[in-house]
Image (tube, rainbow, N blue to C red):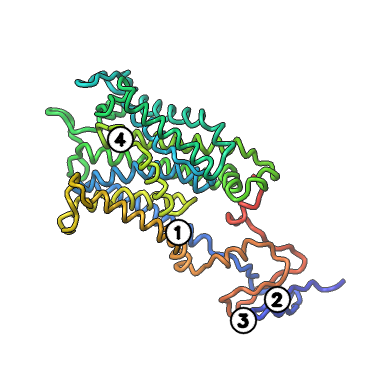
């Protein structure tokens, strides 16, 4: 009976054999060249928890201007996540995001609002605000479902041009369906309340909410509402991408033909991605309605759709954290420039015809899109991954090598000759359950 031997692979590519009873084979643990995924996951978890804690504490220290800025950023981030699931993950270009945001905004205003208006009367169903918000999101999803047969048959620029028709249709309805939208002057939005608790300034003699000695007003209360919606939307998108459906959407983006050969129902998944993106846009529309208070139809044109595309390109196509970062940059830039316009003497007053803060902000994030496409197509998310890999000491090439099947001796770069890898000849390679290999499995 022959002795069991193991193969020892060194840095220079050489291989030596050692008996199973030798110190090399049995006395020391065999190294597999695995990537420290636990370190990366731990860092991501710590950063996420820290950001949430900071976001919870910020309203207690910010003034009203920065609170309004934060509300605008969080509302934009919810819509950017939805568009990134469609355009970044699935690869479907859509210019109709403004249309679905408008459905969420005016849907909530009509379902939960009361009849009113002076110059242009409008109606309202006066439903509970929570029910009205849910119905507005569902209505946006139904609108996306109605357009999904077209979205499932088109892709690329063809889908972008087809979805552009929804923006023109939406503008016509918003300006002319006055009984719902209030016409060009818009309509008021009802105060949101949850189980009888209003997210508004307390009335005289009413209950005043105090947190750590700080009385919470309307913007502080809305901050926590918006933050809760953003966290829920973020977690849902991350879990979707990590599951079977997320892998199928990514396969459709990479190669539709290969996805169909592997058993993916391309049309069904493209339709579902469009519906989910529409519901995210509807949720962003509800938040935007609460932020604006009196939305007007002019705010939901083609410019808004292009702005959301800029958000996901700057943040990184296909990256959920990148969508949040891109939304923060695009949504906060004009507000910051307007707030600190005194430090920029060349800025003109809004409406004067010169370069005001809003126009300069468009130049800035337009230039940011060009810079990203030329220098870092992966956006801010790619830069974040580089920093994370630098902290953990891993590289993309090492991850690919660790995930690939081991069929021949492969030298691990950056490993000292003493840190050789022992692989038992009688056992197959340990393929493990690396998440980076999940995209190679059939969804």
Label 3 environment density (alpha carbons within 10 Å; few <14, some 14–19, many ≥20):
few
Q: Nearer the viewer, residue 390 or 362?
A: 362
Disc 4, SS:
helix
Along the polypeptide, which appears first: circle 1 or circle 3? 1
Q: Say which label, 2 or 3, has the lower sequence index.
A: 2
Q: Residue at x 56, y 45 (%)?
A: 246
Q: CA distance from mark 4 to mark 1?
A: 30 Å
Q: Is residue 209 left or right of residue 79?
A: left
CA gap, disc 1 and disc 3: 41 Å
Q: Which residue is mark 1?
A: 373
Locate the N terminus by quadrant. Answer: bottom right
Judge whether residue 248 can be spotted in this image.
Answer: yes
Residue bearing mark 3: 417
SS of the residue under disc 1: helix
Residue indicated by mark 4: 298
On the rendered structure, is 266 left or right of 319? right
CA–CA distance between discs 1 and 2?
45 Å
Q: Position of residue 124 (x, y in %)?
A: 30, 19
Query: Which residue position is annotated with label 2?
Result: 8
Quadrant hosting residue 279: top left
Name which of mark 1 and mark 2 comes first in the sequence: 2
* Location of residue 33 by image quarter: bottom right
Q: Is residue 407 left or right of residue 39?
A: right
């Amino acid at each position: 009976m022959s002795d069991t031997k193991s193969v020892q692979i060194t840095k220079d590519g050489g291989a030596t054999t050692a008996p199973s009873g030798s110190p090399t084979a049995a006395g020391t643990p065999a190294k597999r060249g695995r990537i420290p995924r636990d370190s990366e996951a731990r860092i991501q978890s710590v950063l996420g928890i820290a950001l949430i804690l900071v976001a919870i504490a910020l309203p207690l220290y910010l003034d009203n201007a920065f609170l309004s800025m934060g509300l605008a950023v969080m509302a934009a981030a919810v819509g950017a996540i939805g568009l990134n699931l469609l355009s970044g993950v699935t690869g479907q270009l859509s210019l109709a995001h403004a249309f679905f945001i408008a459905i969420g905004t005016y849907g909530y205003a009509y379902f939960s609002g009361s009849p009113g208006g002076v110059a242009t009367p409008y109606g309202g169903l006066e439903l509970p605000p929570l029910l009205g918000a849910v119905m507005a999101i569902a209505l946006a999803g139904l609108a996306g479902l109605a357009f999904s047969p077209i979205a499932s048959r088109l892709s690329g620029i063809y889908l972008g041009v087809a979805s552009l028709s929804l923006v023109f249709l939406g503008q016509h309805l918003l300006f002319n369906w006055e009984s719902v939208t209030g016409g060009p002057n818009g309509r008021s939005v009802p105060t949101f309340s949850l189980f009888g608790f209003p997210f508004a300034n307390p009335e005289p003699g009413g209950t005043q909410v105090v947190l750590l000695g700080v009385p919470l007003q309307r913007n502080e209360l809305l901050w926590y509402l918006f933050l809760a919606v953003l966290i829920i939307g973020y977690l849902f998108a991350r879990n979707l991408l990590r599951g079977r459906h997320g892998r199928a959407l990514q396969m459709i983006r990479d190669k539709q033909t290969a996805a169909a050969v592997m058993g993916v129902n391309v049309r069904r998944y493209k339709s579902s991605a469009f519906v989910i993106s529409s519901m995210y846009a509807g949720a962003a529309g509800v938040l935007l309605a609460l932020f604006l208070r009196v939305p007007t139809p002019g705010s939901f044109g083609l410019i808004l759709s292009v702005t959301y595309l800029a958000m996901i390109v700057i943040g990184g196509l296909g990256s959920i954290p990148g969508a949040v970062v891109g939304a923060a940059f695009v949504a906060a830039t004009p507000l910051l420039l307007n707030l600190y316009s005194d430090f920029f003497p060349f800025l003109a007053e809004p409406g004067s015809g010169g370069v005001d803060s809003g126009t300069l902000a468009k130049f800035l994030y337009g230039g940011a899109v060009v810079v990203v496409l030329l220098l870092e197509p992966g956006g801010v998310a790619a830069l974040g991954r580089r920093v994370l890999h630098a902290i953990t000491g891993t590289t993309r090439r090492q991850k690919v090598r660790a995930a690939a099947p081991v069929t021949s001796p492969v030298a691990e770069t950056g490993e000292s000759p003493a840190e050789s890898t022992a692989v038992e000849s009688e056992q197959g390679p340990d393929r493990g359950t690396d998440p980076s290999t999940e995209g190679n499995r059939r969804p």
